[in-house]
Image (cartoon, rainbow, N blue to C red):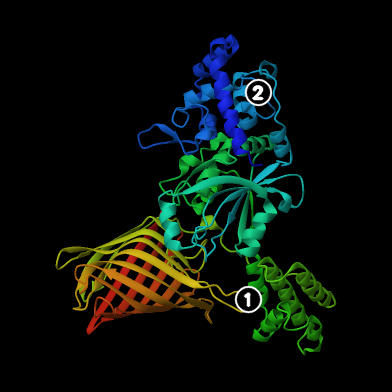
Amino acid sequence: MLLNLKALAFFLAALFATAAMASPALSSTVDMLVSKANDLQLHEERDWEVLLHYAKTLTGSYRSRIDDERFFLSPQGRTDGKAELEATLRSFFVPATRDGEHTACRFPARFEWLKAKLGIDASQFPRFSCTERDKALDSVVANSAVLVFPVGHINSPASMFGHTLLRIDGSSRSNLISYAVNYSANTTDTNGFIYAWKGLTGKYQGYFSMMPYYLKVKEYNDLEHRDMWEYKLKLSTAEVGRMLNHIWELQNIHSSYYFLDENCSYNLLFLIEAARPQLHLADKTGVFVLPTQTVQIVMESGIVESVHYRPSQGTKIRKIASLLDQHGQRLAYDLATSTAQAEGIKADTISDSEKMIILELAAEYAQVRFARKELDKDTYSKLYLTILSERSRLGTPLKDTYDIDVPPRPETGHDTTKTALGGGARRGEMFAEVDLRPEFHGLLDPDQGYLRGAQIKFFDTALRYFIPSEKIEIKTLHIVDILSITPRDMFFSPVSWKVNTGLDTEAMANGTDYLIYRLNTGGGFSYASPLGGIIYGLGEFDMNAGEKIRGKVTIGPGFSMGDVEQITEWWKSHLYARGVWYELGDDRYSLKGTVAQNFRLTRNNSLDLNYSEEYVNSHRISEVSMLWNYYF
């Protein structure tokens, strides 16, 4: 499906040269069609705006979201739809010297739309052939389209928001042989801070790509253990065909990738609109555009026909493991790691039904080990077949044994921008507080529709007004604040980690509050609690800078530990403690314990109650607060 860049560059150069030489002798038919297009103002129609990815700027003018100059036939094409339309129309009448070099081969969606709008008979165009394009597009049977949402990958900063892609389905019953259309940033960064900075400032280039869907299922479902939601779209075969033509036009074309707006989800909206421009999906986005928001926009448009939940292999393994005690889980693990033999399970005194579950779990985990390349193909095949052979001897499990409860859908969670109003007391002094968090989700926020144990916040800002002293202070202004805690178990052993940086008002060695700059990072482990929550412990490194610090800059080691519990569907609790000892640049230590509660009132309303006790050197600082949160 990928175009040859050198051939494309040669083709465009030859095209412009040929067009320039032929322009004095252009037929009256071409001039008449250009005049007709101008009279009809086709460049102002939504279809053309979508095909060029035009979006309104703050000044009211239009500018394409695509940066790559190869996507435009006019030098002014990125900002001048009329010039681009005329250049495109004229190029269709320039004879091609070789197979595949006609503009219609490169821009089939533009070609078909202009031909239909202007009523151009196919015989009016010079003869051309597009063997490569036709072969590539004919290999994709395009009957229907599905918007796919893989949930966030908690240990990857590039994926904690979740992701969206499109699946093009044919007539086969198995959608695994369908094609997936993806837009993603070209990046290999795994450091959360570096990724966030580059993503916020457009330092990455984003590309569209097309590949077999089973490869995406393997990547997300099997390797990264990300559940997937599939939203089938109510599009006709003709509409899906228009979408596919536009996808071809975007092959190898890059745009600047911005984490919070021009991202995977925003750009996919143009593909759906290429099928049906009247939807105006991209126009309904706000300043920030995240995958859950675009799913919600698509749902509200009425174009979704049905929704299907595809649990990941990790989810399946955890479900099966939950049916066993520690002994059963250990036996399944030993079978999958070849430290025990499948035949040996016969001698165990456990019931046949439990043996059945153990063997099912061992088979699933053996597949995970093979996907991770922990087993070569021959070793895996022998191990897997041995487990299945023993498993088949025990018969068929009960019908609902491995059924997985369907979690709340991504678009049913709270909106991603939050404002909070409230107040409290610090050292007995009353204050009023207002918070604003542009994006995305905090650890204490309601989990419905979100990834449990994940926190990712940008520009989280809190201001306080102390009533007796009439003093206004910045409580926090965090540029980025990421926390990832996911439980370890016998089968999976992720590392928990955190990174945040920004401004904080903190008590110094003399017990007085001052504004400082902080960079904090750390890592550790998390485990499932007896109540089903998450218990975590992290080692930390903390750096502070400020005028009231003895050495202006101080660094020190620390720790944080806590317990996050979803007590009821509407009540969430977070108990945690944190300690830091500043050994270089200051002589301060801080020990702080906090009890935080969140009460979910409605989808976009919740209430926070917080109480903390902190000891900074010999100074004790108590604080209590209550905040009403509104998500929008």
Q: Dot 1 lies on which element?
A: loop
From the image, tell me which residue sits under label 2.
96
Q: Which residue is mark 1?
A: 491
Identity of the amino acid at label 1?
Phe
Instruction: Say which residue appears at 58% left-offset and 64% top-offset.
Output: 407
Label 2, label 1: how far apart the Cα atoms are: 59 Å
Q: Secondary structure at mark 2?
A: loop
Q: Nearer the viewer, residue 417 or 374?
A: 374
Q: Give the mark nearest the N terminus, 2 or 1.
A: 2
Judged left or right of residue 430, residue 448 is right
Q: On the image, which quarter does residue 109 sit in?
A: top right
Mark 2 crowd level (few <14, some 14–19, many ≥20, 10 Å Cα): many
Q: State which quarter of the image contains the N terminus.
A: top right
* Above or below, 552 relative to 238: below
The reply to whether residue 310 is in sight is no
Q: Is residue 22 left or right of residue 261?
A: right
Q: Residue at x 60, y 74 (%)?
A: 492
Question: Residue lying furthest left in this view?
Answer: 469
